[in-house]
Image (cartoon, helix red, strand yellow):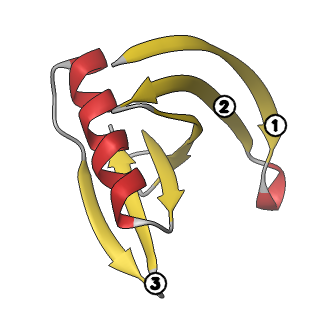
Amino acid sequence: MDVLGGGAQFDEGRGGRTLLRITITAEIDGVRRDYTITFGRYGKDNAAVGRAYIREEGDAERFFALIKALTGEEPRGYRVDGRIIIKCG
């Protein structure tokens, strides 16, 4: 696994909320991809939560491995409408 680059920028989401988008360019198992995690504040406790939306199973597995390598923690994921949503806390 090679992390080739990345960046971060603020964006305005629905309802005027400020979001942080982190983009990571990585090559995992010979496949180069840009992964984007969008962080916002959600829920009653206003907790910061990051989400990434991925359609392909193989990309999700590579993304799980990337997040675990970078943070040491395994993210949670679930399926909704054919997409895989990965939550990063």
Residue at 69%, 19% in the rendered image? 8
Q: Residues within 10 Å of mark 1 (few under 14, many from 20)?
A: few
- Which residue carries the number 1 mark? 11
Q: At which x and y percent is residue 24?
A: 56, 24
Residue at 30%, 17% in the rendered image? 70
Q: CA distance from mark 3 to mark 2?
A: 25 Å
Query: What secondary structure is marked by label 3?
Result: loop
Residue at 16%, 37% in the rendered image? 74
- Which residue carries the number 2 mark? 20
Nearer the observer, 70 or 17: 70
Residue at 80%, 60% in the rendered image? 15
Nearer the observer, 27 or 81: 27
Residue 45 lies left or right of residue 65; in this view the side is: right
Could you say which disc has been placed on residue 82 in the image? 3
Picture layout, residue 50 above or below residue 26: below
Position of the N terminus, as image quadrant, is top left
**In the current view of this chain or complex, which residue is farthest to the left?**
73
- Amino acid identity at mark 1: Asp
Q: Are marks 2 and 1 in contact (CB under 8 Å)?
A: yes
- Amino acid identity at mark 2: Leu
Query: What secondary structure is marked by label 2?
Result: strand
Q: At which x and y percent is residue 68?
A: 21, 28
Q: Earlier in the sequence, mark 2 or mark 1?
A: 1
- Amino acid identity at mark 3: Gly
